[in-house]
């Protein structure tokens, strides 16, 4: 079942959770966690609300949390506080005896939804007509299980923002060209850092169903899917220029899901882990403007009070879909478990799991 089809089956949150106080919800979650013990594992993504992270057994990025779920063989129930594609990956890596639950089915990912399997299969046929058997597909882990499976059965692999460079280098040892899904910005920034010129990159527009490029078609080495992160696209060069005027001593660090122009204008760019570790190791008293999701930026500011940490975009809002998971939905999921119900279980079929795991394993087999 597609993510949007699943959304149509969502039940309304029971009114009782709206009527409970925050302290009542917190106490009840702690009670259920104690009752279920090692049978329950709650992974929480970096971008989750603080009120959810408080109850997470582990915090990290999407693949890291899926791998921790895989390693936790005691857990029968994995209540994944993230978004839909993350829960899919956890389900694919865990055993059939383990159950992955997403507290709110509306917690999707706009980027992942920008590349559906029908669009991708059509694009693949058209690109094969243009370039023959010279293309290897790579997909960011921020993609659906179906897209990961597509890459798996076509010899490709997944990538993370941490290992994108090594995976793109590997891809070019396999084929002359690559198709990078679904985030054009991570693909462009990574390829450029490896010496590929902008005119050697084209954009596949799945709506117009055509390849758009500035240079000769035959010179294209990287085909970028026309997708993006709605959060990271909200950082602009104008924000950087304004900050340079107001506070020239401030360091600017951004995620590579930001646009090419923003990444080039920033001082540093890297994965969520890189951003966290860079600020952790920074000298006390330094100032950092961060171009990534607001919940994480606020948490970094709290964790490192000896530094000035703030968002590059002063009007930035948290990721809306990630932010759908709150105390109410977390508690609802847990109380359903106590009553013997799997509320919003995430399951990936056997063939998709097999092919998607091929793509994941090809990545895990490569040195970073």
Image (cartoon, rainbow, N blue to C red):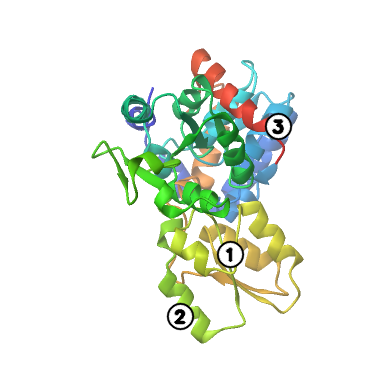
Image coordinates of residue 51 in percent, x first then y, are 58, 53
Mark 2 and mark 3 lie on one chain; the one further toward the N terminus is: 3
Q: Which one is in front in this view, the residue at disc 3 or the one at disc 1? A: 1
**Element marked by disc 3:** helix
Circle 1 sits on which residue?
298
Q: Residues within 10 Å of mark 1 (few under 14, many from 20)?
A: some
Question: Which percent across, then down, holds residue 29?
Answer: 62, 41
- Quick check: 315 above or below 328? below
Quadrant of residue 266 in the image? Answer: bottom right
Q: Nearer the viewer, residue 129 or 46?
A: 129
Secondary structure state at the residue bearing disc 1: helix
Q: Which is in the foreground here, disc 2 or disc 3?
A: 2
Tell whether label 3 touches label 2 (CB within 8 Å). Answer: no
Of labels 1 and 2, earlier in sequence is: 2
Label 2 environment density (alpha carbons within 10 Å; few <14, some 14–19, many ≥20)? few
Question: Residue at 63% across / 27% down in the picture?
Answer: 362
For label 3, count other residues whose C-alpha is less than 10 Å away and answer few (under 14), some (14-19) or many (20+).
few
How far apart are the two marked residues, 1 and 2, measured between alpha carbons? Answer: 21 Å
Say which residue label 2 marks.
Answer: 242
Q: Which residue is mark 3?
A: 35
Residue 126 in the image, given as x and y percentages of width and height: 31, 28
Q: Is the Cβ of the residue at disc 3 closer than 8 Å to that at disc 1?
A: no
In the displayed structure image, the side of residue 30 where residue 217 appears, left or right: left
Residue at 63 percent of width and 32 percent of height:
363
Front residue of this view, candidates 40 and 116: 116
Marks 2/3: CA distance?
A: 52 Å
Query: Can residue 365 be seen in this snapshot?
Result: yes
Q: Which quarter of the rendering shows the C terminus?
A: top right
Q: CA distance from mark 3 to mark 1?
A: 32 Å
Q: Position of residue 249 (x, y in %)?
A: 62, 82
- Which residue is at the front of the view, 230 or 132? 132
């Amino acid at each position: 079942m597609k993510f949007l089809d699943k959304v149509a089956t969502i039940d309304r949150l029971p009114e009782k959770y709206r009527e409970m106080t925050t302290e009542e919800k917190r106490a009840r979650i702690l009670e259920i966690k104690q009752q279920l013990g090692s049978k329950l594992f709650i992974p929480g993504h970096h971008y989750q609300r603080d009120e959810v992270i408080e109850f997470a057994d582990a915090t990290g990025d999407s693949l890291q949390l899926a791998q921790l779920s895989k390693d936790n063989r005691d857990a029968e129930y994995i209540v994944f506080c993230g978004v839909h594609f993350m829960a899919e990956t956890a389900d694919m890596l865990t055993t059939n005896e383990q159950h992955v639950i997403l507290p709110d089915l509306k917690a999707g990912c706009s980027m992942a939804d920008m590349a559906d399997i029908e669009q991708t299969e059509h694009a693949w046929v058209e690109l094969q007509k243009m370039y023959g058997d010279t293309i290897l597909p790579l997909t960011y882990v921020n993609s659906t299980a179906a897209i990961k499976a597509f890459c798996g059965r076509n010899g490709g692999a997944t990538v993370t923002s941490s290992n994108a460079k090594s995976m793109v280098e590997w891809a070019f040892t396999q084929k002359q060209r690559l198709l990078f899904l679904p985030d054009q910005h991570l693909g462009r920034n990574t390829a450029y850092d490896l010496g590929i010129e902008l005119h050697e990159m084209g954009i596949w527009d799945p709506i117009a169903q055509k390849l758009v490029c500035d240079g000769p078609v035959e010179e294209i080495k990287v085909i970028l899917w026309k997708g993006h992160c709605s959060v990271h696209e909200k950082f602009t060069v104008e924000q950087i220029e304004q900050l340079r005027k107001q506070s020239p001593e401030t360091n600017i660090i951004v995620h590579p899901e930001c646009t090419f122009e923003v990444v080039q204008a920033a001082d540093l760019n890297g994965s969520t882990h890189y951003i966290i570790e860079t600020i952790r190791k920074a000298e006390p008293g330094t100032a950092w403007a961060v171009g990534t999701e607001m919940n994480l930026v606020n948490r970094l500011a709290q964790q490192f009070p000896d530094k000035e940490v703030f968002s590059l975009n002063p009007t930035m809002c948290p990721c809306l879909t990630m932010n759908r998971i709150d105390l109410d939905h977390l508690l609802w999921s847990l109380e359903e478990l106590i009553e013997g119900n799997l509320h919003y279980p995430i399951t990936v079929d056997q063939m998709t799991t097999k092919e998607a795991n091929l793509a994941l394993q090809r990545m895990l087999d490569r040195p970073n």
